[in-house]
Amino acid sequence: MAVESMSGRETGTTLVKRGLAEMLKSGVIMDVVTPEQAKIAEDAGAVAVMALERVPADIRSDGGVARMSDPEMITGIQEAVTIPVMAKARIGHFVEAQILEALDVDYIDESEVLTPADEAHHIDKWAFTVPFVCGATSLGEALRRISEGACMIRSKGEAGTGNIVEAVRHLRSIIGDVRRVTQADSAELFEWAKQLQAPLPLVREVAETGWLPVPLFCAGGISTPADAGLVMQLGAEAVFVGSGIFKSSDPAPRAKAIVEAATNYRDGHILAKVSRGLGEPMPGLEIDGLDTRLADRGW
Amino acid sequence: MKVGILALQGAFGLHERVLSRLGVAPVQVRTPDELAEVDRLVIPGGESTAISKLLDANGLADPLDDRLADGLPVLGTCAGMILLAHKVVDGYPGQRCFGAIDVAVIRNGYGRQSDSFSAPIAIDGWDSAFPGVFIRAPVVESAGADVEVLAKLDGVPVLCRQGSVSVSSFHPELADDDRVHRWFVEQE
């Protein structure tokens, strides 16, 4: 005989917000610009889609100010799929975030891919029911974002380049420093907090648990199943693919292959099988030749 | 007893942590060979569409169907509940559901992330409430006569069992409370 609970429901708690990030682990979150692309992503096994007007490669080549997407476009994508829908707000643009929350998106990405709205402050993310993901290039940056209320961190990489080298640099920096912090004694943690410019309680939490207080995903430059396998083996817990799918010659099979790679990331035979015959990946860019480094945005 | 956790996508790492704390030494299951070796299985929360496709991609769908038919004890949480259900109302076309327990579920029935919530759950015969965490959770629309409903929230079943199959629409792996896992591994 079931016991009846009457709801004392609490929404927007830290556990509930971080909980959705836990459910996305070992999955692939794909950038999409139309409902049709969102369907392709869902059919391929994406765990979520990021609704935006232009993928990072186009933002990079078009130039100008990149802003939050048109609500109509976001709503169209929400109607097209049953998986979570994320959307991007500019760094510090808390009103764009308020609009995205009103649209009932499942996660907000306070993203360096868009043009920053504030050169000193990020959004106070504790003020929202909807959870936020933020980019980071280092452990200090990750912990600052978590102190502001981010419930998921993604290493930034360099979006829109199809070049994995920056993602690898950022992941190695974050995870390497996590390892070093766990080796520090209690007195050294004060110095770590100062060096990282991060709150001491969060530095202590990393030292005690050996990991960030929220999931660490990877973004920026993933364009092949091998790239997904690489960042997962380095310690990323899931991947974001921006331009890498829909700027390739044949998006649907590539999307499916990257999904299978994120799950079977240690199995060379499966990675070999899913990497076959995918057509041309997105065109790549050398980091040294870039006019704008998106990863430098954020403070 | 060897407890496996389906580790294709989702919160399998959290289940692993809770079970390890109970001294169970769980193993991750991604292949048919790994599935063949376990005596019990946890199907975690995650995205049921993605897990469903990965079951096919990794050749696990038919072997899992066979093991379930043979009475493999299994605990499905959230997405795991959807996969084990008899029917998914408004489901994704072609979505796997193994029909291991006679419940019909509505995917994301509790709504989007803004409606995700935590709430204390009173469970039949347990001395205190369990901290339930519901993330874009499925709603049990109906449960068959052979299904034992162990807990309800606002009149809707949230923890059910039929034979060796147990399902919850909430995430015990997110709670700082190992009683649901203990209950599962101690079942006959």
Image (cartoon, coloured by chain):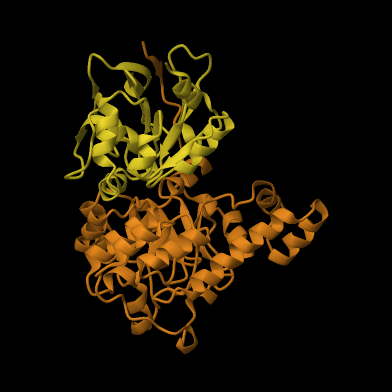
Chain colours: A orange, B yellow
Q: Position of residue B28 (x, y in %)?
A: 44, 42
- Residue A216 vertical position relative to residue B141 in the rendered view, above or below: below
Name above or below for residue A233 compared with residue B69.
below
Indicate left or right for A152 with B144 as reference. Answer: right
Q: Residue at x 52, y 32 (%)?
A: B19
Observer-nearest of A51 and B21: B21
Quarter of the view holding residue B67: top left
* Residue drawn 53% across the image and 27% down it: B178
**Front residue (pair B127, A6):** B127
Work out which quarter of the rendered image holds the C terminus of chain B and state it.
top left
Q: Is residue B172 above or below residue A153?
A: above
Residue A44 in picture, x, y percent from top left? 25, 56
Instruction: Give the residue at x 42% y 60%.
Output: A239
Point out residue A275 in the picture as x, y percentages from the top left corner: 31, 66
Q: Is residue A183 visible?
A: yes
Residue A31 in sight: no
B103 to the left or right of A241? left
